[in-house]
Image (spheres, rainbow, N blue to C red):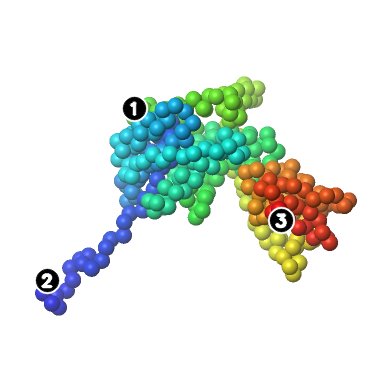
Amino acid sequence: MTAGAPAGPGTGSRTAPEPLVLVACSGGADSMALASALAFESRKLSLRAGGITVDHGLQHGSDLRAAEVVSRMTGLGLDPAEAVAVHVGREGGPEAAARDARYAALDDAAERHGAAAVLLGHTRDDQAETVLLGLARGSGTRSLSGMAAVSGAAGRYRRPFLEIDRQTARKACMVQSLPVWDDPHNADPAYTRSRLRQEGLPALEKALGKGVVEALARTAQLSRDDADALDAWALQAEATVRDDAGLLECAKLYALPPAVRRRIVRREVIGAGAPAGSLFARHVEEVDKLITSWRGQRAINLPGRVVARRQGGRLVIRQS
């Protein structure tokens, strides 16, 4: 190009890369159907589509199965397609520990690849199971709201199959002749969710008739709407119940509706260092008694070495 000649199209500039969307794929019917759907839709939506499978290392040959899943994702046209091995600890029980390790690996993969979103293959059946598990724990409206369609930091995690039943996802794989892997843990009675899936939900449908899964999924959405409204109320009210030092004043907390007050207490306990997954309704209720039923009781020990006590009309929550 001669000096002073006008620059041609694109000279001196670079086209921004298309956004990358990853799918978390275990090789099961739900996630394989989602991986196939992502591969198909990405071509129409100007997206790059990739996939991640997490090897929890909990079964013999899990590394070989992870490699097979990577091969299947590559065959669908997903790029990048990789397996990530994780170490599963023991904190919170085997199911919670595996979930924590899995999400940590997915977060890391999303950061490394600069992914705009990570798709999860949770279905309406998974949502129904989550609602029942929350009901069994007595964890309140937020727990009954199940899984959100969009969650995580900056809305990283997306669950596009929440309104699709598990059987539909399996049929999608059959129609496309997609091989799937049925995790034996999903049928292992040692796991609470497995017992619920194999025994609990079928028993409910036998007793109450078909439509239980759909009803539970609707309950999740209604509960989520209520929980969102109460969370917003609690967030606004929290600023009005603190003293100049930032401590929560018990008299002002007492004046709030219980649902709002307990949300403030829960946020405070988690903010002090208690793991959210280990903090149950009974813990929050015990702290709430320091506000509503004060009789000089001792400090309350909470998960994460957090201690709650009442001092001088203030609710003091700190890590020991």
User: Image point 41% across, 28% down: which residue?
Assistant: 61
Residue 130 in percent (x, y) is at 59, 36
Q: Are marks 1 and 2 in contact (CB under 8 Å)?
A: no
Of 243 and 63, which appears nearest the observer? 63
Marks 3 and 1: which is nearer the front? 3
Q: What residue type is labelled 1?
A: Ser
* Residue of label 3: 318
* Residue of label 2: 1
Q: What residue type is labelled 2?
A: Met
Q: Which of marks 3 and 1 is nearer the N terminus?
A: 1
The quarter of the picture where residue 93 lies is top right
On-image quarter of the N terminus: bottom left
Residue 16 in percent (x, y) is at 31, 60
Marks 1 and 2: which is nearer the front? 2
Q: Earlier in the sequence, mark 1 or mark 2?
A: 2
Q: Which of marks 3 and 2 is nearer the N terminus?
A: 2
Q: Distance between the residues labelled 3 and 2?
A: 68 Å
Q: Is mark 1 on a helix, strand or loop?
A: loop
User: Image point 59% across, 26% down: which residue?
Assistant: 190
Q: Distance between the residues labelled 1 and 2?
A: 54 Å
237, above or below 74, in the image: below
Of 33 and 2, which appears nearest the observer? 2
**Can you name the residue that lies furthest to the left here?**
2
Does any portion of residue 260 appear in the rendered image? no
Q: Which mark is residue 36?
A: none
Q: Is mark 3 on a helix, strand or loop?
A: strand
Residue 237 in percent (x, y) is at 71, 61
Does any portion of residue 311 appear in the rendered image? yes
User: Image point 80% across, 50% down: which residue?
Assistant: 299
How many other residues sit within 10 Å of disc 1, few (<14), some (14-19) or many (≥20)? few
Q: Is mark 2 on a helix, strand or loop?
A: loop
* Residue of label 1: 177
